[in-house]
Image (cartoon, rainbow, N blue to C red):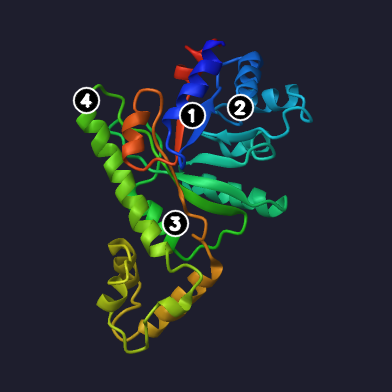
Amino acid sequence: MSHISETIEKLNRELPPDTRLVAVSKFHPLESIIEAYSAGQRVFAESRPQELAAKVKELDGQKYGDIEWHFIGHLQTNKLKMVLPYVTMVQSVDSIRLLEAIDAWGVQNGRVIDVLLEYHIAQEEAKQGFTREEILSVLFGHSTYNGVRFRGLMGMATFTDDEAAVRDDFRKIKELFDEISAFAGHNGDASSWDISKNADISDIAADGMPAEVQAGWMADGKVDGMVERIVKEMTEWMAEGRLSAFDQLSIGMTGDYRIAIEYGSTMVRIGTMIFGERQY
């Protein structure tokens, strides 16, 4: 058995049942992907649009048609047509501009693209991603997205040997993920909300509303006798079902996936451990 096959088998034994293995095949040849596929791997990730498009086209679609491609790199809006026709998920949505471009492409092409919002949890400023406040604004704001489906969060821990720093990064994204997930538990079921025109904002917040969302409504003048507007907006938000599928937390790579599992990772992105050092 080859190194690739052995490693995939080992990881599948090690990972919890609710944690998916995403094989990061960027910079590795088709032969390595085919070998991993033969070992049972079906989810692969790429980070360069040109490389992804070339690999998809070179693989026999009929023979490898059940491969699930994810995109995990920084994606420029002028490269969408090289990525979106082929992927089932974009894990690295790191800006409003990119999110809106993906949404527009989805609407124009009759597709709904699964996306993860990238949370900038690492200490390195060079890494991409939203702040906590920006993520909450996207998910609970006024904009409507018909071409994307919000599936969860993605994050990369600080590149360091300091395990405490890595744990702190994963703790931050896990806390935000849990907060959003708890609030989204009401999604689509307005009857679960005990809100009336006489309700106080603290009653609504007690149901799990993130503090930033509450503050945003206050800033918009939607409190102080205008709770009925909140009720209407929340009803529309729940009917939209924006977070009905918000259940994915993509954290953990070759060097830190075991720690990520402790913090509830549902997808680990592993490349070097499976394929070795990048080949091109």
* Residue in the foreground of this view, choosing between 262 and 216: 262
Counting residues from the start of the chain, the first of labels 2 and 4 encountered is 2
Residue at 27% across, 23% down: 160
Is label 2 in a helix, a strand or a loop?
A: loop
Query: What is the quadrant of the C terminus in the image?
Result: top right
Q: Is residue 176 visible?
A: yes
Splitting the image into 4 quarters, where does residue 201 fall? bottom left
The residue carrying mark 4 is 162
Most distant residue in the bottom direction? 198
Residue at 53% across, 27% down: 23
The residue carrying mark 2 is 40
The residue carrying mark 1 is 12
Looking at the image, residue 90 sits to the left or right of residue 61; the answer is: left
C-alpha separation, residue under disc 1 versus residue under disc 2 = 10 Å
The residue carrying mark 3 is 138
C-alpha separation, residue under disc 3 versus residue under disc 4 = 32 Å
72 w.r.t. 210: above or below: above
Q: Give the class, few, some or many, for how many residues have Cα within 10 Å of label 1's Cα (few <14, many ≥20).
A: some
Residue at 66% across, 17% down: 30
Amino acid identity at mark 3: Val
Query: What is the quadrant of the N terminus in the image?
Result: top right
Counting residues from the start of the chain, the first of labels 1 and 2 encountered is 1
Amino acid identity at mark 4: Asp
